[in-house]
Image (cartoon, grey):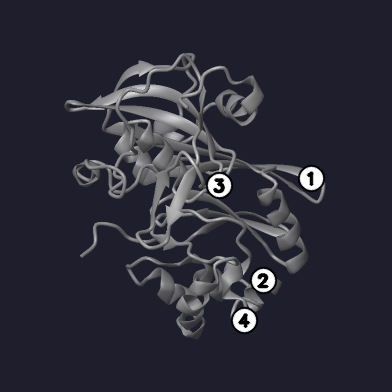
Amino acid sequence: PRPWQKSAPQVIFENEEMQVINKPPYWNCRWTRSVEDRKEDREWITHDRRSWEQIIGSNQPEYLDLYIARRFQDEMTLAWRDRPDDGAGFLHRLDCQTSGLMIRGKNPESFDALKKQFFMQKVKKGYLCLAHGQIESDGPFRIDAKLSYSRENEETTVVATGGEHAETFVMPLAHAYWGHQTYTFCAVRIVSGRTHQIRKHLEYLGHPLVADRKYNPLGARDKEWCPRLFLHAYEVWINELGTEHRFVAPLALDLRVALQKLQVAENLCEPGRLREVPTTGLIDQVLTDELMDLKSSTQTFDYF
């Protein structure tokens, strides 16, 4: 038997144009509109006739768009069978083990308009993660390193030439330890949205994420106290038809439980800023405001 049980995605906001989902771990997001050689790989999924209840109860990772297409009725879910590469309206993706916020358009017009915001990097996305080692910094810093993703081995590498621009802001929040291992709890914002961007940027820095078996040699050992990749999509700022939205998904319960097993060595924030994390999964809004407002031109400390 597996040590985890898949749970249902939760709708935290919905109107006529878009839907905001809090994705639990163990849901796959593998749709794409641009890679033609994956279209045939996913055509079989449209022939899956299970109900959404059966998909939740399968006790194995499932495709998130399949569940959404079965669970909800709107223009994008109804068109999903003929256009599976649109992901039932989802505007971005998360790794299978990553939890947190995802946004989808509910009709072609809102899907295209919101997708344009993502493409133009106007959507702000903040994450919480736990990295190996003690990240030393006087404050937030910027990682600016190009990334190249290989579909053959499904891994991302940092490259000096070629590749795609990738920019990540990191705000260390606290240092902690478990046994002889040290860790840094971080808030992270990605400007671009490359595959495995946070995981690879921090690994390249020498601080791979906890329980990341792809980029972390100690990933398997981390499973002794952390059940999965410690990465959570915490906050999204997006403009929808002239309305500014700010969505927050508290740190998932299984990651809060893992965090409670650590001993805090040094709090890098003002007192009280992280007080609610173990119980509610929320960090002080002052911290996320600072993170989301960071600009490349104002940063004075880069690792690259």
Residue at disc 4, secondary structure = loop
Which residue has dot 4 on it?
Answer: 82
Mark 3 and mark 4 lie on one chain; the one further toward the N terminus is 4
Do callouts 4 and 1 mark residues in contact (Cβ within 8 Å)?
Answer: no
> What is the C-alpha distance between the residues marked 1 and 3?
23 Å
Q: CA distance from mark 3 to mark 2?
A: 23 Å
Element type where label 2 sits in the image:
helix
Q: Nearer the viewer, mark 1 or mark 3?
A: 3
Frontmost of labels 3 and 2 is 3
- Check disc 3 and report its element: helix, strand or loop: loop
Query: What is the number of the mark on residue 193?
Result: 3
Q: Residues within 10 Å of mark 3 (few under 14, many from 20)?
A: many
Q: Amino acid at mark 4?
A: Asp
Residue 10: x and y in percent read: 53, 57
Q: Residues within 10 Å of mark 2 (few under 14, many from 20)?
A: many
Looking at the picture, which amino acid does disc 3 mark? Gly
Residue 76, disc: 2
Spot occupied by residue 278 in the image (x, y as percentages of width and height): 39, 32
What kind of residue is marked 1? Thr
Left or right: residue 114 versus residue 282 is right
Q: Earlier in the sequence, mark 4 or mark 1?
A: 4
Q: Which residue is mark 1?
A: 243
